[in-house]
Image: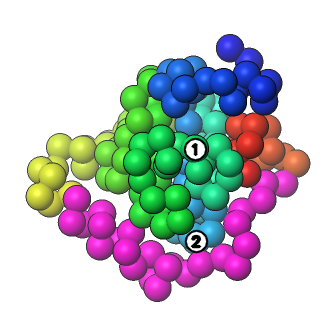
């Protein structure tokens, strides 16, 4: 399916979109989240993942369809093989999809929820204080633009 066709994308359900492409939706204002994006771009040599910022029309649609707040992005979303992951499970799914040694970091998915959810939530709540916040949402340069989905920035 050619996801570069914007009208086609608007007609896809979230499930259809997630099944058609592995996607990472991240907070484009968050320095930590944008760092995660840059980390993934640098290591995803096969360009398996496409991206969208949470602030973009497509990102807003993801958050809205999942019943998540559309003005406070305390989780990145990672879709792999049609499954949407949130919080530490999103990080784990992204690491597992990378080549090389990175899948070892996916072991965090085996942590019990009572450990990983509070840990992730503490980092998410304090990410702007600890890592900072950009004044503007990330806007990809020409080299990165092809890695973003239509309406993804």
Residue 107 at x, y percent in the picture: 25, 44
The answer to whether residue 95 of the structure is visible from this angle is no
Residue 61 badge: 1
Q: Which residue is mark 2?
A: 31
Does 141 appear above or below 123? above
Q: Few, some or many C-alpha atoms within 10 Å of disc 1 (few <14, some 14-19, many ≥20)?
A: some
Q: Residue at x 50, y 79 (%)?
A: 128
**From mark 2 to mark 1, how far is it between C-alphas?**
22 Å
* Residue 153 left/right relative to 84: right
In this view, the mark in front (2 or 1): 1
Quick check: is 135 in the magenta stretch?
yes
Query: Chief secondary structure of the magenta span?
Result: helix
Q: Secondary structure at mark 1?
A: helix
Query: In this image, 83 relative to 22: left or right?
Result: left
- For the record, the magenta segment spans 117-141
Residue at figure coordinates x 38%, y 69% from the top left: 124
Does 34 sit above or below residue 110?
Answer: below
Could you say which is closer to the camera, residue 116 or residue 96?
116
Q: Mark 2 packing: few (<14 Cα in 10 Å), some, or many (20+)? A: some
Quadrant of the drawing holding the N terminus: top right
> Above or below — where is 58 with respect to 69?
above
Q: Is residue 15 left or right of residue 3?
A: left
- The secondary element bearing badge 2 is classed as helix
Q: Quadrant of residue 121?
A: bottom left
Depth order, front residue of 96/83: 83
Q: Residue furthest right?
A: 142
Q: Are marks 2 and 1 in contact (CB under 8 Å)?
A: no
Q: Is residue 148 above or below residue 30?
A: above
Q: Position of residue 39 (x, y in %)?
A: 57, 54
User: Residue 151 placed where, x, y %?
Assistant: 74, 43
């Amino acid at each position: 399916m050619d996801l570069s066709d914007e009208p086609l994308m608007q007609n896809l359900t979230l499930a259809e979109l997630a099944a058609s492409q592995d996607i990472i939706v991240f907070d484009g204002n968050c320095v930590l989240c944008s760092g995660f994006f840059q980390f993934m771009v640098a290591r995803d040599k096969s360009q398996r993942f496409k991206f969208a910022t949470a602030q973009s029309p497509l990102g807003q649609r993801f958050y809205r369809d999942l019943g998540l707040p559309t003005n406070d992005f305390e989780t990145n979303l990672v879709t792999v093989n049609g499954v949407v992951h949130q919080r530490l499970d999103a990080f784990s799914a992204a690491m597992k999809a990378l080549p090389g040694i990175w899948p070892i970091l996916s072991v965090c998915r085996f942590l019990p929820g009572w450990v990983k959810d509070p840990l992730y939530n503490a980092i998410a709540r304090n990410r702007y204080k600890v890592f900072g916040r950009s004044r503007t949402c990330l806007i990809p340069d020409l080299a990165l633009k092809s890695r973003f989905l239509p309406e993804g920035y």
